[in-house]
Image (tube, rainbow, N blue to C red):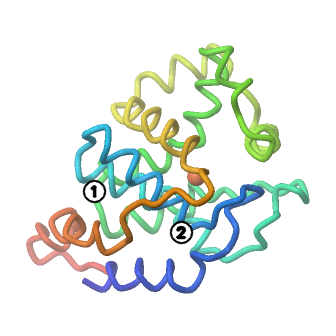
Amino acid sequence: MEAIEKIYDLFENGGDNAYFGEAVSQKEHALQSAYAAEQEGASDALIVAALLHDVGHLLHGGPEDMADHGIDDRHEVVGRAWLARHFGPEVSEPVRLHVDAKRYLCAVDKSYEAKLSPASVLSLKLQGGPMSPEEVAEFEKNPFAQDAVRLRHWDDIAKIVGLEVPELEHHRDRFPKLLKSAHASGEAQS
Ligand code: FE
């Protein structure tokens, strides 16, 4: 339960920050991503992954314009590390891979890069640019690659100013059954 309170706390305390170079807040971006996942009939785990895909930004609390300063904050690594403590790989792995999924899509779909927002193009450069053919082959082997690509598409569209979507509370019931502590047998959780 502690993890759920932490999620609420992060959104309450950092959720109003601007979403890196975009016109929506972190919280609006997260809620729009989760709603897009829900609209496409995604599983609860993938909806939660969509909701929390940028939790690394909220956890590290760095300046919101880091990409403008040429810094890649590696938020997918920070986010994945925290999520993996509390949730299974069906939540944490799509989050870890959502930046790679952008690099993947830029490599396999030429029209994709053209549709990226300016902030996303800037961060792509910092993240290593489009994948090489070898990286593409490696990425496709990951069992969560397709979930990460779906998440990526929701991430890309979740930047609509003023779009009304359900609040965080709408998703509360999805968390408990996904928590490791819900099915751990005496395993210590931090
Ligand atoms: Fe995002």
User: Quick one: quadrant of the C terminus?
Assistant: bottom left
Q: Few, some or many C-alpha atoms within 10 Å of disc 2 (few <14, some 14-19, many ≥20)?
A: many
Closer to the camera in the image, 113 or 138? 113
State whether label 2 is within 8 Å of ligand 1.
Answer: no
Q: Few, some or many C-alpha atoms within 10 Å of disc 1 (few <14, some 14-19, many ≥20)?
A: some
Q: Position of residue 93 (x, y in %)?
A: 40, 47
Figure check: 104 above or below 80: above
Which residue is depicted at the point 56% across and 20% down? Answer: 136
State whether label 1 is within 8 Å of ligand 1.
Answer: no
- For this view, does 98 lie left or right of residue 127? left
Q: Position of residue 74 (x, y in %)?
A: 66, 56
Closer to the camera in the image, 173 or 106? 173
- For this view, does 76 lie left or right of residue 123? left
- For this view, does 76 lie left or right of residue 185? right
Three-letter amino acid code at disc 1? Gly
Which residue is depicted at the point 18% across and 75% down? Answer: 187
Q: Given this view, does label 2 or label 1 mark the residue nearer the observer? A: 2
Q: Earlier in the sequence, mark 2 or mark 1?
A: 2
Residue designated by label 1:
88
Three-letter amino acid code at disc 2? Lys
Residue 82 falls in which quadrant of the image?
bottom left
Residue 103 falls in which quadrant of the image?
top right
Residue designated by label 2:
27
Q: Position of residue 102 (x, y in %)?
A: 61, 34
User: Quick one: quadrant of the N terminus?
Assistant: bottom left
Which residue is depicted at the point 32% across and 79% down? Answer: 4
Closer to the camera in the image, 39 or 130? 39
